[in-house]
Image (cartoon, grey):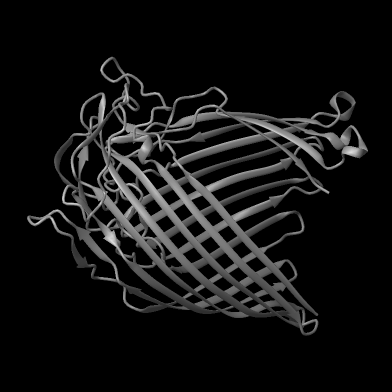
Amino acid sequence: QNQGVFRTLHMYTPGTGTNDMQYPTCGTLIQNSNCPRIPRNTFTGYKSWNQHGNREAMFEFMFDHKFNNFISFSQVFRYEDSQNDVKDTYSRIGVSNSEVALMPWSIQGSSRTIGLDSRVHGKFSTGPIKHTWVVGSDFRQLSYTQNALYDYTKTYTQNLYNPTTDEAVCLDISSPTCSVRGSIGPYNYFQEGVYFQDQIRWKGLSVLLGGREDWVNYNSERFTVSNINTAHTETKTKISGEPQPQHAFTWRAGLIYNTTFGLSPYFSYSTSFVPQAGSTNYLGKAFSPLTGNQLEAGLKYKIPNKDILLTAAAFHIDENHYLISDLAHSGFSSDAGRVRSQGFEVAANANVTKDLRVVASYTYTDLRFAKTNATAQRVDTSGNYYGGAVSESGKVVPLMPRNMFSIFADYTIPSTFAKGLGINWGMRYVGYSYVDNVESFKTPAYILFDIGAHFDFGQVSQTLRGLKAQISVSNLTNKYYLTSCDGSFCYTGQGRRLYGNLTYNW
């Protein structure tokens, strides 16, 4: 038996601008007579230099062949092509309580990816033990080019409470009147792997064993560029220190036991090796692969004769070359060394009645820098550094909340009252997070409320079967809140939003 499926995709997003809602702590985290609240519709950049456009194309072919009841073959080929063009500014420092300094920048990037995954899989039994196995190989070839330039010609500013007209930016590195720095050039990335997995079942016990060997190679021709010199001419410097060809073996094992009364304890351990392709620091240097290991144990409980599932899990994760946001260069990442994440999660998914559904979860995460030689000064809420350098080791990773809780309820009104109508409600709690790598101060916690309604026209008329409408409101109270702060700047969250959609399925 043979089966083949083709998929294609072409997506074009015009160069429409966006507002990242990044503002100084004065006017967001701090609000007083000297720092009035900055409205979240304030645009700090230049409208004439605000473009985020991209074009993506994809072709995919999936093929399956079944030899017999025990062995099958499947293959997936995928080709992707993308281009992006970004012209934007980011806030550098606060000049005063009412003004912010801007850094104009641009990125032109393009990438092409080819991937092929081939596998043989099947099922067999050894006495009372059943096996579901797979053996395969895949590869991925990425060619990526990124040209990033920053405008150092002068200090650009913008008034936060009375934005001025646009200023002309100067990002022509060949011009003697512009002062520009950045990084340009391509790099190629290749990854190939072979893998295997066996899922073993015996009565209520399931055991999963798997492994994978990966080979990775980078080939870079990237340069830092600048015309900031005495002669004011463009210079190029080859970026050194690219990762060498390397390989790694990773594996995973897990087990779960399903009892007759609905309780299922489980345990898993896995190692990881993830090349961070397509991600570079602000100088254009590729990052080393992300490696780590994860330990998880938990319980799942399906209440007998009820459509209610309760879960609880505890986890411990160590990761090397963990990427965090580069607080000094917007849009880029930096290597945080080894980080450790541990915590637990509890969740409930319950159809309480045929008309009422409730979903709730709580997560506690303690994410810290476990091994790093980096140090940094602490900063106060006004953006001023103080004291000596502090080790980042053992500190909490910034921008990551420790506590998160959410609950969502959906109620379909019985047909005797309002046939086809349903209403829902939700609450989201996000705990505080630290602003930098040395726990200088915190971004406050916040709670948001959402509501919505849906209507099934098919419940009213059979001729409208498949037609459904839905409307929802997020941040119902229009709360002014901060999603994160980085020491000098904060990001404001979205205000009240109304969403609506009409769908028809047949």
Residue 420, horizontal then vertical, whole percent: 83, 32
Q: Residue at x 22, y 34 (%)?
A: 383
**Which quarter of the figure has residue 38?**
top left
**Residue 335 at least partly seen:** no
Front-most of residues 393 and 266:
393
Q: Residue at x 62, y 54 (%)?
A: 299
Q: Residue at x 76, y 37 (%)?
A: 352
Q: Residue at x 69, y 68 (%)?
A: 6
Compared with residue 389, is residue 72 higher up or lower down, i.e. above or below? Answer: below
**Which quarter of the figure has residue 279?**
bottom left
Front-most of residues 212 and 176:
176
**Residue 8 at least partly seen:** yes
In the rendered image, which quarter contains the N terminus?
Answer: bottom right
Q: Residue furthest top?
A: 33
Compared with residue 388, is residue 384 higher up or lower down, i.e. above or below? Answer: above
Residue 220, horizontal then vertical, whole percent: 32, 72
- Position of 59 compared to 228: left or right? right
Q: Residue furthest right?
A: 462
Residue 330, horizontal then vertical, whole percent: 32, 46
Front-most of residues 415 and 282:
282
Front-most of residues 138 and 197:
138
- Position of 316 compared to 322: left or right? right
Numbered disc total:
0
Residue 213, horizontal then vertical, whole percent: 48, 79
